[in-house]
Amino acid sequence: MSRLTDNDLIEIQTFIDRARADLDSRNLTLEVDSDLSKWVRLINRAPGKVVVASTHDPSKTYVHPGNAFWIIVRERDQRLIDRLMRRERPIVACLCHRVIQTDNIADEIRTHRLFFDRKPILDYRPVDIVLTENAPVVGGKVGLAGGFWVHPRYRGSKLSNIVSRVTRVLSLRHFDIDWSISLVRDTPRRKAMIHNTYGLAHSVSITRGYYPPYGHDLDMQMSYMHRDEMLEQVRSENAAARAVSADQTAAAVHPTLPQLAPKRSAH
């Protein structure tokens, strides 16, 4: 049973409609797919140094239509060469998502289950969890975003802002998640990117030293957001967009009259 109200569902759809309109204005389209093996094939062929995250790789973790999907942004118009070669319209950005049911996401990291739950592992190395006492226990239905990629031609166009938010609200509506999280390197630059671009509300250091999916030392942070904060973000950003639209409509109906220069008196 979903905990979302009818008003919540309307706000979420309004949010998605705005995202699609924004992309349409850029000649781009938005799609969703539940087969993450297609994402793996895309990343393996993608330009640049791109890593397939084990957390969303079907060969390493148990991701399936019941707990995962990925968001796809494509070029809207098919190029002649693609039609001739019978190829799909090019993908320009994507983001994966999966849901983990757990009492505490830190336990999934500590036991390596988050990275390799497709089959038991024979070799285990301890993971140093460094969460502070005031960090919340992230548990229940936890949505984990990962595997973000943008084609080099489209970097700097703020697609990550749209894709990350749409991913969260779709997971909220489809899986009724309690938390949304992202695991990234523990650096000030990454923290700023997660907050300012992806829109996640909080970050906390979570591991030091050995990090299982890469097999070497890499300090990590967890950015997170509770479902109530996700809904509030949807409402506030929808409200801001409505206010801008209302101002633009008012300006179009009642344009500001040009100021006339005062007449000079004749002497």
Image (spheres, rainbow, N blue to C red):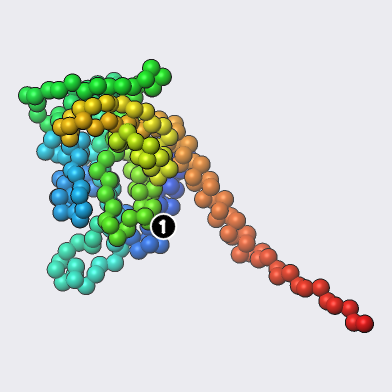
Binning the other alpha carbons within 10 Å of mark 1 as few (below 14), some (14 to 19) or many (20 upward) gives some
Give percent across and percent down for residue 167. 33, 43
Within the image, what quadrant is residue 98 found in? top left
Find numbered disc 1 in the image and state the secondary structure of the residue it sits on. helix
For disc 1, the marked residue is: 21
7 or 20: nearer the viewer? 20
**Does residue 20 sit above or below 117 in this rendering?**
below
Outermost residue toward the top?
133
Q: Is residue 174 left or right of residue 134?
A: left
Q: Is residue 62 visible?
A: no
Residue drawn at point x = 20 percent, y = 40 percent: 53
Give percent across and percent down for residue 152. 28, 57
Q: Is residue 245 visible?
A: yes
**Does residue 258 sit above or below 3 in this rendering?**
below
192 or 22: nearer the viewer? 192
Residue drawn at point x = 34 percent, y = 24 percent: 138
46 or 94: nearer the viewer? 46
Residue drawn at point x = 17 percent, y = 32 percent: 216
How many marks the image carries: the answer is 1
Q: Is residue 63 left or right of residue 265?
A: left
**Looking at the picture, which amino acid does disc 1 mark?**
Ala
Task: Quarter of the image for the N terminus: give it.
Answer: top left
Give percent across and percent down for residue 80. 21, 72
Give percent across and percent down for residue 92. 27, 57
Outermost residue toward the right?
267
